[in-house]
Image (spheres, rainbow, N blue to C red):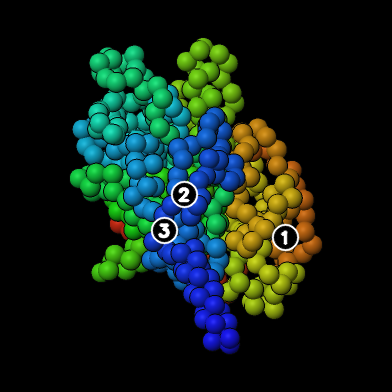
Amino acid sequence: MSGVVLLITLIIILIILYIYIQKSNPNDVSPKYIKHLDEPSGPYGPYRTKAPTQIDIKEREIGACRVSNQLGCKIVEGPELYENIRDAVVMISVNQLWQGTGFFVTPDGYIVTAAHVITQPVNESEEGGAIKPADDIYVLVSPNFEVYKCRVAGIDGTGDIGLLKIDMDDPFNREQKPIENQKYLPFLNKATTGELAFVMGYPLGTDLASFSMGIVRNERFVAPSLFIPFNVVLITAPAYQGNSGSPIVNVNGEVIGLLTFVYYANEQTFESIGGGPSSSIVSYVTKRLIDADRLKINNEPIPAYFDPKSLKYKKGYLGFESSKVIWFSDLPVLINKYGFPYKQPIGFRGKLSKTSNLNNIIGPKDIILRIDGKEIGALPGQTAPGDILWRKVPGDKVLIEYLPFQKDEKYGEPKLIEVKLQEYPDTVDTFEGRALKVEMDCIGDQCSLASMKASADDFWLPHSKKPIGF
């Protein structure tokens, strides 16, 4: 009798084990193991009016994500994501030369790219001078790889954000397939450090619609020298010349950043750090440029943030020629010698232009703590100045809180001042200050964490020998 019971028990155990193995089988790709995302989570920016193409994301411990699987990492099959976004990404040619990458953001032909891809110097002989829209711009559109002529619809020089438009009434485009329901990419307002990041583009001019993968190494980087004056997304995905203007997307195919620069930390191994403006800035500027372009086409009043002649996005300008964020390595001397009243990094200091409204009020050793009540800095909860100023226009007023550096070489009590924002000078509203070595005056004998020490060859941005201001 006991033998029968034992046999029955063994059979039951085998049945349970078989069921468990079937449910756990990682090779089972039947629908019950696939999460269908009819509506990806989070905001998509101002353009998506319908759910994006369905993406199948399979949750498996494979590849590089295995090490972070405890964080709830979701694995996307690369070919699926590639096919989903490929037709939204274009190659850009300027003046018969391959130049970079862009991507559709509306179904009727608006394309976002990096401003340095679609602009040229006003004066070719002037180094680091004003920029203007380039002429003779064409894009290669998949899946049929047809060529269309474009016009520049808007430029944010300092932000390095550019907008193109395909007009079907252009004589070159009339015989082409109409751009009516073009596949386009949605925006997600925020990247997450550690999530997978993909870059799609046309590097080297011959690598058609290439695809690379990495992670978001920093979702909200604030450069020590503020060489980009707003929050930046940094990624580890490999990128090369020609990826300028590529979308940085997550596993859902949502844009989390715009690739505008790469810094080669190791020239022998081509180890690089790439990145660009976060999607929150890119989507904000892009939406406003599209709105302004449509108003211009319809001969309606143009908003104050857009210059219809130069096609430039107009944002608030404080008048800083160069700047330096206060960082942790600055604190010991600032606190012990100069009476800095904070125990954590906060604020920035900088050199003002001769025409700034802050002249004779704020000195080069004064530290600006907050703008409109928002802390400036690189820590969580702080922000870069541009994330505030890019949402203002010339003539708007902002409230600045700063620490004055006194005659006794000590910092005094915080002060408040209201200042009217100015318009960016043409020679400052340019991307060309990215690859630079910023020289800052020291506070007493304290020369703190050096700003980015890079040569113009380290970035894909030519000509520059001067800082970007804000």
Residue at the extreme bottom = 2
Q: Which residue is mark 1?
A: 403
Q: Height in image: 167 above or below 17?
A: above
Q: Is residue 216 visible?
A: no
Residue at the extreme front = 1
Instruction: Specify few, some or many for label 1: CA neighbours under 10 Å numbering under 14, 14-19, or 20 or more.
Output: many
Q: Which residue is mark 2?
A: 31
Residue 356 falls in image quadrant: top right
Q: Name the residue nearer the viewer: 274 or 109.
A: 109
Q: Is residue 9 visible?
A: yes
Q: CA distance from mark 2 to mark 1?
A: 60 Å
Q: Position of residue 321 (x, y in %)?
A: 52, 50
Q: Is residue 236 left or right of residue 296?
A: left
Q: Which residue is mark 3?
A: 28
Q: Position of residue 156 (x, y in %)?
A: 47, 37
Q: Name the residue nearer the viewer: 92 or 332.
A: 92
Q: Residue at x 41, y 58 (%)?
A: 28
Residue type at tag 3: Asp
Q: Position of residue 450 (x, y in %)?
A: 49, 68
